[in-house]
Image (spheres, grey):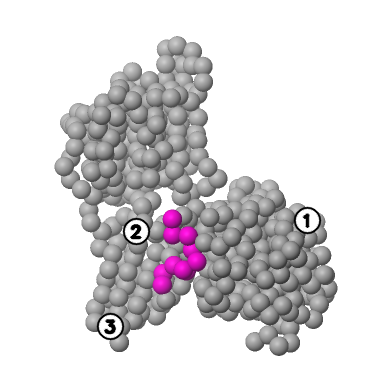
Amino acid sequence: MKILLAGEGGQGAQSIAEILARTANTPDRFTTYIPNFGVEQRGGVSLAFLQISDQPIGYPKFEKADIIIAMGNRAIEPVKKFMSDQTFFIYDSSFIADDLVKTLQGQVKKYLALPAKEQARQIGSTKVANIIFLGALSYELQELPVEQIKKAMEGQFAAHPEFKDTNNQAFDLGLKYAKERPNQEFTGSKPKEIQKLFEDENKAWERFPEYCKGCSLCIISCLQKALTFGQDLNFLGTNLPQVDLNKCLACGNCQKICPDGAIKVTKKN
Amino acid sequence: MENLPKCWNKKALPHKFCPGCGQSLALKILGYAIDELGIQNRAVYATDIGCSLLSWNMFDVDTIQTHHGRATPTMVGLKLAKSEAIAIAFMGDGGGYAIGAQHLINACLRDDKITIILINNTNYAMTGGQMAPTTLLAEKTTTSPTGKKIEFGRPLLGPEMLKTIAADGAYLARCASNDFDTTLKYIKKALQNQLDGRGFSFVEVLSMCPVNWKKDAQESLDFIKEMEKVFPLGEIKIPEGLK
């Protein structure tokens, strides 16, 4: 079984690959895992190559994958060359539009649209979206017992015992999702349109989810405390700031401090 | 004001810096300075090795990426060959104060007419936050896990060091990247000093590194305040005639 996981750096593609590799690494199996990412500590696409086999494995990378997981929009392009007509493609439908996935028709065997980020937010933290993917993946990897994966997961996040319950919940959610909607083709839904422009008669406050990295510098530099994290997500899958126009004075502090140019404030006459 | 500088390369966005990085903030301000002075067609931008190289395609200006610490001599050579170019060398504290210190000192001594912008985040950020010449005493890094001891030297004060050898036309300043207006003012002055052909210009920008400091945004800004106690802000040397 050749599995390729792709996501933005920081989303946790490497963590779940490591969990699976640890689980699968038993005396009767051969397992390899190798991460592949660029110079970016965060904010680039990171790939994880995972192989589980009964036979010795010659090389940790591979040309075509049996399962591909894409956790973000930018993850699609780098995984395209690993697709074959035998590939099972799992993607995060809370980011990736169906239109984009439709263009892959014929290149992969089947799809699973998993709205992991949305689901993760509902149980309390968008950080556990990767665990939802792990849950869905564990359904495909029937040879690995769920208890052992959970045990490895606990070991992986031993430094954060406070996430244990959320992680378990997320895992079960992903597993349930994969069971109930086996290999479904499209959800027919589109990711939610994100409101970009907030304006009234005096000012306009615009945000750019395609640039925002959710660093929260704008929120703490707002003297009026007009900014808060909202429910909408940026391209990295962290929360986007939103403005309370009644408090905002259009001073432009948030625009000045934003390292990514993701906020634009305009005063009207 | 637009949300992005005009001279930024929009195709390379979102840029590759970490969330909350002060270096990208300094680069945004440098972009506005280039826009306001209208020197996009004349500017040549050199990045060093380190996090600064993540900006290799950030600007729509001629860009060169050099060896570690060699952004300064590359720009000195360019300025000698092509005096109408506006040479901007961008580097981190490792590239400027450690491996490239000889070039920085000699460029200042010769009063080369280039602009150097140096990011001080008290560590080697790209390789995982090792101890740098600017690391504060008692600050924990991956190579000083119990806090930096005095045996490794006090934090290096770059502009103050250069002031002792700088020629009359040199401009030396230090600012913090979270202070947009001051940083823009200083960087514009540093570029103007070169435009006027007056002399060497150097701006040190204190910058947040939330990932390697292992701090969130608020704690990073608090740490910048701590840094300001050691690295005093302000214009350390202003040449006569520069407004």
* Residue A139 visible from this viewpoint: no
Q: Is residue B4 magenta?
A: yes
Which residue corresponds to mark 3? A202
The subunit carrying tag 1 is B
Indicate which disc residue B152 carries. 1
Residue at (56% x, 77% y) in the render: B37
* Residue kind at label 3, given as amino acid type: Asn
- Which region is colored magenta? B2-11
Relative placement, left or right, of A62 versus B226 is left
Residue at (74% x, 63% y) in the render: B81
Name the residue nearer the viewer: B38 or A124.
B38
* Residue A182 visible from this viewpoint: yes
B17 w.r.t. A161: above or below: below
Say which element carries label 2: loop
A246 w.r.t. B110: above or below: below
* Residue kind at label 1, given as amino acid type: Phe
Q: Main secondary structure of the magenta part?
A: loop
Q: Are marks 3 and 1 on the same chain?
A: no
Indicate which disc residue A124 carries. none
Q: Are marks 1 and 2 on the same chain?
A: no
Q: Residues within 10 Å of mark 1 (few under 14, many from 20)?
A: few
Q: Residues within 10 Å of mark 3 (few under 14, many from 20)?
A: few
Residue A36 in the image: state x and y as whole percent.
50, 35
The subunit carrying tag 3 is A
Between circles 3 and 1, the one closer to the viewer is 3
Residue A108 in the image: state x and y as whole percent.
29, 28
> The C terminus of chain A appears in which quarter of the rendering?
bottom left
Relative placement, left or right, of B47 versus A203 is right
Quarter of image, res B84: bottom right
